[in-house]
């Protein structure tokens, strides 16, 4: 993590506004503030932008890189706002003033100098790469590889796996999964080499469009196309990152990156790094006084939970809207369940019960009081027998709910109100 000046840590927005208005007094502070908020939305990005301008004030005079991308975006936005004193970004090679920019590292380029040129495999001319062939070799615009429509190729492969799917449904899924013809060609090549990617081996997909296509085909009703499980944990959920040649879920990626936090010692994925590269966990990041702000309601310096148009709100002062909980049907302050996009109250967020789908005692994430559901966990040992009933009886006594007893393992029912106890009020 770069070393920030104390003024940058305390008020990066004010530092940027002061530097810009010092170069162009015709711009009022409110206008510059709105531009900075639009081009550098987060606190971390604003700090990097402010420190870059503080370290190299000449950026606001000559517009020459190297500099972070956010500086170039700020210069372009200021020019569009009517500033004549602030320069446009300058191309590193040809010196052209830029209205949009490309970059390599922290150097800015125009659309002519930016793209890397390579010898074309077809004609040998060193030109801009238009596309790449099946083996990844560059082709210029005159020598682009000729092939049949990749959409038809993919439709044919899917038809051999699941003939029940209509061709027009598969075509729509292919176009929705991949919008660009070149990327559709890569999808076609991947499925030609490995048709089994559609039947359970999707974690080995060389391009992420294969996974998007699998999801769309399953949603369309395919019974032959299979969503792949995460290789390390075996759960069927979104595979978002490649690791060791396989695509794995976000949780497994976090576990693979876990290391002891330099602040508290807990072993977790680092949220950021200190001045000397030491890892810091998310808790140490948000509890660092430098990252806390004055709460609009309490007036205390606290971690920021949400930002309103008037200012930041801390977790203690944040209020939840009063909605009808999708699980217990009570009207109460509710958050939005990220798994179901439906409201759920605090009591249901703390409720454990036997899942109506997998018959395991888990934290409830959906369903209803009569039929609770939880995300599957095939790699965990379920609690059963008397221990399960004791766990559920204790955990289901969340604030606002009566204790809930469960049936014995193997029964279809998942939970019933305990004798002599009333349901949620």
Image (cartoon, rainbow, N blue to C red):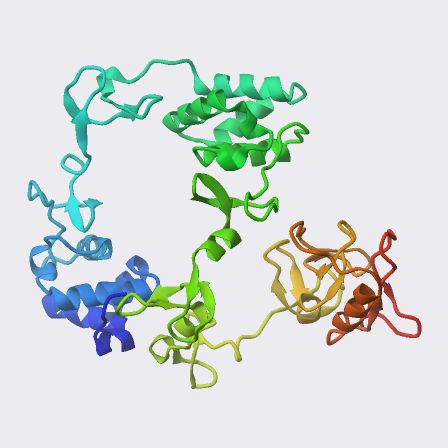
Give the x, y percent position of residue 210. 49, 32
Identify which residue is drawn at 93% across, 74% down.
420
Does 237 appear above or below 182? below
The image quarter in which residue 26 lies? bottom left
The image quarter in which residue 126 lies? top left
The image quarter in which residue 382 lies? bottom right
Front in this rendered view, residue 26 or 268 = 268
Identify which residue is drawn at 81% across, 70% down.
390
Left or right: where 142 falls relative to 64: right
Identify which residue is drawn at 43% across, 22% down.
189
Left or right: where 255 falls relative to 98: right
Q: Is residue 167 visible?
A: no
Left or right: where 384 falls relative to 2: right
Left or right: where 420 falls relative to 207: right
Identify which residue is drawn at 14% across, 20% down.
125
* Quadrant showing the C terminus: bottom right
* Quadrant showing the N terminus: bottom left
Give the x, y percent position of residue 190. 45, 26
Does 351 appear above or below 81? below
């Amino acid at each position: 993590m770069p070393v920030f000046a104390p003024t940058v840590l305390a008020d990066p927005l004010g530092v940027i506004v002061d530097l810009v208005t010092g170069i162009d007094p015709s711009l009022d502070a409110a206008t510059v503030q709105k531009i900075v908020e639009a081009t550098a939305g987060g606190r971390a990005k604003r700090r990097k932008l402010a420190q870059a301008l503080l370290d190299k004030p000449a950026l606001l005079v000559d517009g020459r890189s190297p500099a972070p991308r956010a500086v170039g975006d700020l210069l372009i936005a200021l020019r569009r706002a009517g500033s004549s004193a602030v320069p446009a970004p300058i191309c590193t090679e040809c010196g052209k003033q830029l209205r949009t920019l490309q970059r390599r590292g922290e150097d800015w380029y125009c659309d002519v100098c930016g793209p890397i040129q390579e010898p074309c495999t077809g004609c040998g001319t060193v030109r801009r790469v238009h596309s790449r062939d099946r083996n990844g070799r560059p082709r210029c615009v005159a020598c682009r590889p000729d092939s049949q429509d990749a959409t038809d190729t993919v439709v044919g492969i899917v038809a051999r796996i699941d003939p029940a799917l209509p061709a027009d449904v598969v075509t729509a899924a292919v176009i929705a999964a991949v919008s660009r013809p070149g990327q559709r060609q890569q999808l076609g090549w991947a499925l030609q080499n490995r048709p089994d990617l559609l039947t359970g081996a999707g974690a080995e997909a060389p391009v992420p469009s294969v996974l998007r296509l699998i999801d769309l085909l399953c949603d369309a009703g395919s019974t032959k196309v299979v969503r792949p499980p995460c290789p390390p944990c075996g759960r069927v959920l979104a595979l978002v990152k490649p690791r060791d040649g396989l695509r794995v879920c976000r949780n497994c990626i976090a576990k693979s990156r876990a290391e002891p936090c330099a602040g508290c010692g807990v072993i977790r994925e680092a949220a950021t790094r200190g001045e000397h590269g030491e890892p810091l966990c998310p808790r140490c990041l948000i509890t660092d006084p430098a990252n806390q702000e004055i709460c609009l309601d309490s007036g205390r310096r606290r971690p920021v939970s949400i930002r309103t148009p008037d200012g930041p709100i801390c977790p203690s002062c944040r209020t939840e809207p009063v909605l009808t909980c999708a699980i217990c049907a009570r009207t109460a302050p509710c958050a939005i369940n990220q798994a179901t996009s439906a409201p759920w109250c605090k009591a249901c967020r703390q409720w454990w019960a036997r899942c109506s789908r997998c018959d395991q005692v888990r934290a409830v994430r959906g369903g209803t009081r009569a039929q609770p559901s939880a995300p599957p966990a095939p790699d965990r040992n379920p609690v059963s027998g008397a221990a399960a009933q004791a766990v559920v009886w204790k955990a289901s006594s969340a604030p606002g709910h009566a204790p809930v007893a469960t049936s014995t393992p193997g029964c279809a029912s998942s939970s019933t109100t305990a004798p002599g106890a009333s349901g949620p009020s």
